[in-house]
Amino acid sequence: MVLKFFAIIALMVMALTITGNAQDKFTLSGYVRDAENGEELIGVTLFISELNKGAVTNVYGFYSLTLAPGTYTLTLRYIGFKTKQVKMDVTANLSYNFDMISELIAMKEVVVFAEAVDANVSDVSMSKVDLNIGQIKKLPALLGEPDLLKTIQMLPGVISAGEGTSAYFVRGGSSDQNLILIDEAPIYDPSHLFGFLSIFNSDAIKGSELYKGGIPAKYGGRLSSILDVRTKDGNNKKFSGSFGIGSIASRMLIEGPLRKDRSSFLVSARRSYVDVFLALANNNNRVYFYDINAKINWKGQNNNRFFVTVYSGRDAFILDQDFGFDWGNTTATIRWNHLFNEKLFSNTSLIVSNFDYGLELTDPVLGFLWTSTIQEFSFKEDLTYYVSPDNELNFGYHLSYHKFLPGKITPNASSSIFSTVELEKLFALDHAFYLENQRKLSNKLLIRYGVRLSVFQNVGASTIYTYEDPKDNINIRITEAITYGTLEKIISYVNLEPRVSIRYNTGKHASVKLSYNRMVQNVHLISSGTVPLPFNTWYPSYPYLKPQIADQIAGGYFRNFRNNNYEFSVEGYYKWLNNVTDFADNADIFFNPNLSTEFRQGISRSYGLELLLKKNTGFLTGFASYTYSKAERQIEGVNDGNVFVANYDRRNAFNVLGTYEFNRKWTFGFGFTYGTGRPITLATGKYGVNGYVPDFITERNGFRLPDYHRMDLSATLTSKKNKDRKWKSSWVFSIYNVYNRKNIFTIFTRQPQDDNGDPSGEPGAKEFVAVYLFPVLPSVNYNIRF
Amino acid sequence: MKNKNYIAIPLTYLTLMLAFSCEEVVIINLPETERKIVIEGLLTDEFKSHYIRVSQVMDFYESGAFPVVTDAEVFVTTDEGEMFRYIYNPTGEILYAGYYFSEQEYAGRPGISYSMKVLLGGIEFTAIDSMVGVTSIDSLGTRINEDEKANTEFDSLYWEVLLYASEPQEVKNYYLFNFYRNGQLARDDVTDIYAFDDTALGGSLDGLASPVFYAKGDTATVEIMSLTRSGYIYYFDLVNILNNDSGFFSPPPTNPRSNISEGAVGIWQVSAVSRKKLVIK
C-alpha cells in the first residue's frame, strides 16, 4: 500500500514537471490585508479579466499567480469589502501586497468575513461552511454570550443533542468524530460551564471553517468534520481594544502594533463571575471558568513571517469546600510562513496541546485526588506549490506524539483509605503524508484529488495484556503481560485516505459538485453517553482498538442569485463507517484497568439531504437551513447485536438565523430552531429485587423525546461614532426561548415523591420525570471598543 | 463512600447542571412489557434457612404487588454433591410471597461453589456462584457529623458510625456494605448501593464513615459481604440503572448483567458476612 502511495506521488510530480516547464512566465505573489488593521484576509478572490482566471488567498492570506508577461486587470473581491480593481504590469517576478477597505466602516464589528464572494459556486470545496464571527455577535445567544459552536449547531448537516451542550454531530457521526482546531492545535473538550458555553471567545476569533465532506487531504484524524478556528493576529496599525460586560462573564481584548505594519500582539481574556454572586450569597460553592487567547506575530517581510499563539482555559467547580473538579485545555502554536520562492509557500508549525481534568475530595478518610491528562506534540510542514492559476499542488508531512494518561488516584490525606493507583499510560506516534493537486481542466471543470497516508503507531513504554477472551468483561483472565520500552513499537496501523472533489459549472452562477473522502480516526473517546463529559478520557488505536474508518460520497447543486447576494445549495450524502468505537452494554468506563475488555467496534451508516439558503449582503442577512438525516449503528454486544438508531439521530431539523440592520443604531437578530426529538432509552417495565425497583429495558433508543423548537431574539444598540469620541459602545439585549417552550432535556425515573421530596405512593410505584433546562431567559451585554 | 461510586460522576454532573433546570412528572405511552422471570437468591456463611425469590417483571405503570411465581421447583447443589431443596413460603406469610426457603438450615462455606436451579414450565434457570472469605470488622466508632447536625431540623439523625478494618492487598476483593438502623436496612438515598472493588483501596480502612446517620440510642449494625466478580458486576450495573439519566451523560440504561441463565434478571449471590453492632451513646 505504501509503495502504491509513492507511485502516485511520483506520477503527480512528473505531471508537475511537465506543466512547470514553461519558463517564460512570471509570478505575482503576496498577501491581501484589511487596510484598517493589517489583518490578512482569507479567501479573497483575485480575478484577471483578460484571462478569465484567478486565485484565492489561502488561510494565511497569501496568493500566487503565475502569468505570461503583459498588463492585466486584477479585480479583488471579498464580502463586506469594497471591490478593488488594479492594473498590473507583469514583466518580472513581483511581490505585491494588497490592502482592501471595509465597506462598513461605521459597523466596524462586521469586518471579518471569511469568504470569497462567489465561493459557494466557484470553489471546488463542498459541504463546507465559513462562519462570520461579526454576525454571530449580533445573533441572540444563551446568557448573552455569542458562541461559535451554538451557531454551528444551526448549520445544515449539523445536529445538537438538544440545548445547553457544546457537543455537535455532523452527518451522522458522533461528537468525538469532530476535529476542533484553534490555530491548528486540537481541542479535546470545547465546553465551558457544562457546555452551556464553548471555549471560543468571539472577540479573539478571526474566522472559522467547518468541513463536513470533501475534506482536503491536509486535514485528517477525525471521521466526520473539521472545524478550523483561527484567531486574530492583532492590529498592526494602531492600539485598540474592547471591553465587554455580560450576564455571565466579562471580556477584554487589547491589540496593537509592536512595530507599526510589521509586528503586532493581541491579548484577549474572559472570565465568568457566577462565583462572585455565590460568595455574596454566603454560599460555599464556587463555580468559574476563564480563557485567555494571546498572539504575537512578526511579518516584516513577505518571505518570512512568524506567529506565536497561546490558548488556555479552565473550568472549576468547588462544592462545600470539600469536593471539587476542574478541566481545561491549553494549547500553543508556533508558526513560520516561508516563501521558498514566489510559487512555493511553506507553513511550518510546532504545536502543543494539553487537556486535563481533576476531581478532588478533601476528607481525612475518603480524601483522594483523581487526575487524567492527554498531551499532543506536533510538527507540521505544509507546502503549496502554485504551478499556474490553473494548477496548485498541496503537500506536506505531519507528525504527532500523543501521550494518554487515563487516570491516577492519589490519597490526599495520610489517613485516607485510598492508595496510589495509576492506569496504564499509552503513547502513540502519528505520521501523515499528503499530496493533493487542484487542477482547472476547463473553465467549467475544476478538480481536486489527493491522498493522505496515515501511519499510526502505538508505542511504549506500556504494558499490554493479553486476555483469554478479550470480549469477556465479567471473568477477566489475563494470559500474558508484555512490556514494551520507550518508543518501542506495539502495533502500527497504516491507512490510505483518498480524497476527490469535482466542480462543474452549469452556468455563470451555478455549479454541480461531487466529492468522495475517506477519513481515518486513531483516537477514541471513552464515552457511551450521548454527550461527552469533560471526565471522559481518550485512547489511541492499540491492539484492542482498530482505527475507525469513514467513507463518504456527497453531491450537490449550488446556485447564487442576484449578484451573489443570495446563495442556495442542496447536498446529499451517504456515509458508511467501519470500526466505530462503542462499548459493551453496562461497560465500566471510569477508572477501569481492564478497559480493553469493554470496547466493541462495529459499523454505522448515515445518509441525508441538506438545503441552505443564505443572504449575504443588505440590511437583512442570515440563513435558513433544512436537514433530513438518518444515522444507525450495529455493534456486536450492544443492543443484542441488533441495528439501533444512533443517539443523535434527529430526522428533521430546520433552522433560521438572521440579522436586520434597522438603522445605524439598531440591529436586530433572530433565531428559530426546530428538530425531531432525539432518541432515548426508556423503561417499559419494572421489577423488585434486593429491595430496589429497577427499570426494565427492552430496546436501545426505542423512544424519542418530543420535537424541539425555540425562538430567540436580540437587539444591538450601537452608539454613533463621532470624531471627538475615541470609543464606541454597544448594548446587546437578547431573549432566549422567547415563547418559553418547555423542551425536554432528558427523562429519568424515580419513586413518586411528595412536595417535600420524600418518597410517597405505594411501594414499587415509579414515575417518569422530564427535565427542562432553560425557560425564557433575557440577558444584556455591554461592549466598548476603543 | 459518600460519593457512592465513581459511576455516579455523570449523575453528579447532571445534578449540578440541573441547578439551572426544572422537573415535571410526565406520562409516557408505553407498550406492554415482557414478563421476564426475576430471581433473587442469597446464600451466606450463616447457619440458617436461606431464601430464593422468584417473581416477574411488570408494566411500568402497573400498580400492586409484583407478580410472583409459586410453583417452581427450586434447589441448590454444591460442587461436592450436596443438595438442598427449597420449598415455597412454608409459613404462608404474605410478606414472603414469592420466597422459597431451604428445607433444612445450612451454612455456605468459603471456597465452595453453589449451583442454584429453578425449574419452571419446562425451563431450567441455573446459576453458579462461589463463596469468598471476607475481612472482619475490627471495631466500630461513632462521631457527630457537624454539617449534618447543622442541617437537621426535624430529627436528631446526625451520628455517623466509623468502621475500622483491614483490606487484604494481595487478592482482588469485592464488597457489599449494608447499614442497619435498629435492625432496619438504611440507605442515604433509596437508590444507593454500597458495592466496591478494592482497586484504589489501601491496606486499612481507618474510620470509614457510614453514609447513613443515626440518632442517640439507635442500634447501628454494619455488615460487610464478600462478592464474587459476577456479584459485583451485578451490583455495579444495578447502580447504573437506578441512577441514570436515560443515556445523556451516563451510558444508555441496560438491564444488569445477571449470572442466571435463560435470560432471567436478578442474581444468585453467595457471600461470607462479617457484622458488628453498636448502640449510639
Image: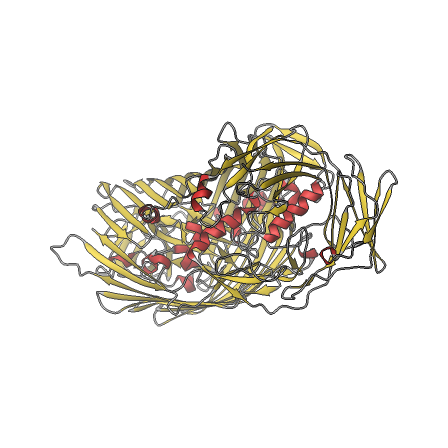
Q: What number of labels is visible?
A: 0
Question: Is the residue A192 above or below the residue A79 in the image?
Answer: above
Q: Position of residue B166 (x, y in %)?
A: 62, 29
Q: Residue furthest bottom?
A: A562
Residue B42 visible: yes
Q: Position of residue A732 (x, y in %)?
A: 28, 60
Q: Nearer the viewer, residue B22 or A370?
A: B22
Q: Nearer the viewer, residue A622 or B163?
A: B163
Residue A28 visible: no
Q: Position of residue A204 (x, y in %)?
A: 32, 49
Question: Is the residue A323 above or below the residue A41 in the image?
Answer: above
The colour scheme used to paint the residues is: secondary structure
A170 relative position to A462: left or right: left
Q: Position of residue A138 (x, y in %)?
A: 31, 61
Q: Nearer the viewer, residue B221 or A437?
A: B221
Quarter of the figure with residue A782:
bottom left
Q: Residue furthest left?
A: A724
Figure quadrant of the N terminus of chain A: top right
Which residue corresponds to the image point at 39% horizontal and 40% vertical from the top-left?
A333
Question: Is the residue B63 above or below the residue A587 in the image?
Answer: below
